[in-house]
Image: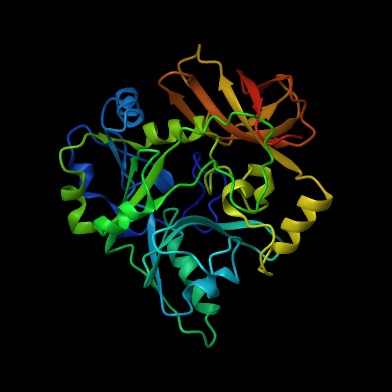
Amino acid sequence: MPLECPPSVRGCLDMTVPSHVRSILLDTPGAVEGTGVDEGVAAHYGDPMREQRLLEDGLAVVDLSHRGVVQITGPDRLKWLDSMTTQQIKDLPPYTSVQDLVLSPKGHVEHDLHLVDDGSTLWITVEPGTAPALVAWLDSMRFMLRVEVTDVSSEYAVLGEPISAESLPAELSDLGVIAWRDPWPALGPDTASYSEVTEHPGTGWAWRELIVPRDAVRAEVGDRPLAGLWAHEAMRVAAWQPRLGFETDHRTIPHELDWLRTAVHLHKGCYRGQETIARVHNLGRPPRRLVFLHLDGSGHVLPEPGTPLVLEEGGRPVGELTSVARHAVDGPIALAVVKRSTPTVVTLFAGPTSAAQTVIVAP
């Protein structure tokens, strides 16, 4: 069913919540279901802070089985998708993970693809509810090429887990496991960073998504403890990693979120939206910028995503909160998108809550 944008989501981008996504892991004692586009999986299992610490220690697993899973088969699959998206994947080696974006003709972000090819099938996981729209668009672009696109979200589930920084793609091939390893925040071979920090806080982020048959979810989890989405989101926000539908809206271009670093190849062939990528990178500046915020946690209630940000209480909005989380170490934190002209050294306000900003995308 179509979703109205809930308070926790900044831009729904035609997201839907299919009926099949309710996870069997919600039957776990203590599980509390997420809301909005994160319905169907657990927000937490009773102790979000403990769950986050277990994640940081590499012990827990996160149920992401509401994410969509798409397969592309056929001998032309890689060069075909390469011609339409932001990454260079026409010669992608098996079991090599890539983040890829689908842009509108004007360069606005429409889909965030987590993809890995196993040598015969290209596996893609996407944000909850976006698989049907992606498949419909891909099918409309097949023409005479030898490709088949299938939404297999009802058959496969996604589990997220921290991994050792030394893990190699060969490990996945040896085990026969389909998994996407998150490249964030490492710079790709021919891209750019819009951040000026020397030590990115996401450098320690080592994460992958396992794609498993839905009837094998419990077996894959095994005896490992479960961590909910609140714990995972706190780690994502602390790593300055944007999320489709949260940090994005219908106007978002990748430069605003520092997404070029992992999701865009700057010198590949023509694709939809490339003109905007090249023009802003070579001649201009993005109109908005992503910032990280430490929120005043003295109150009992944190502001919701979507809350306008102002320079002074009662002032005109300069942006809005996009993701809000409670971090086990850093306390209340958030990501926000603000106008490029917003001063970098001032405290912002989300309602009565003050927010100290850290520059991510340099103005």
Q: Residue furthest right?
A: 283
Number of numbered callouts drawn: 0
- Location of residue 339 with respect to 353 vertically, above or below: below
Name of the residue lying farthest toward the top: 298
Q: Residue, x 35% and y 38% (percent of image)? A: 164
* Residue at x 69%, y 66% (from the top left corner): 105
In the rendered image, residue 134, in percent from the top left (x then y), is placed at 49, 66
* Vertical comparison of 200 with 349: above or below: below
Quarter occupied by residue 321:
top right
Q: Quadrant of residue 358?
A: top right
**Position above or below: 154 against 62:** below
Colour mapping used in the image: rainbow
Q: Is residue 212 left or right of residue 183?
A: left
| Whole-percent x, y for residue 161 in the image | 33, 41
Task: Estimate the x, y position of residue 157 in percent, counting from the top left.
Answer: 29, 55
Q: Is residue 174 visible?
A: yes
Locate the C terminus and report the quarter of the image it occupies. top right
Q: Is residue 133 above or below residue 289?
A: below
Query: Residue 302, can we see it?
Result: no
Which image quadrant: the N terminus?
Answer: bottom left
Residue nearest the observer in this picture, 47 or 33: 47
Task: Please provide percent x and percent y for residue 214.
Answer: 23, 57
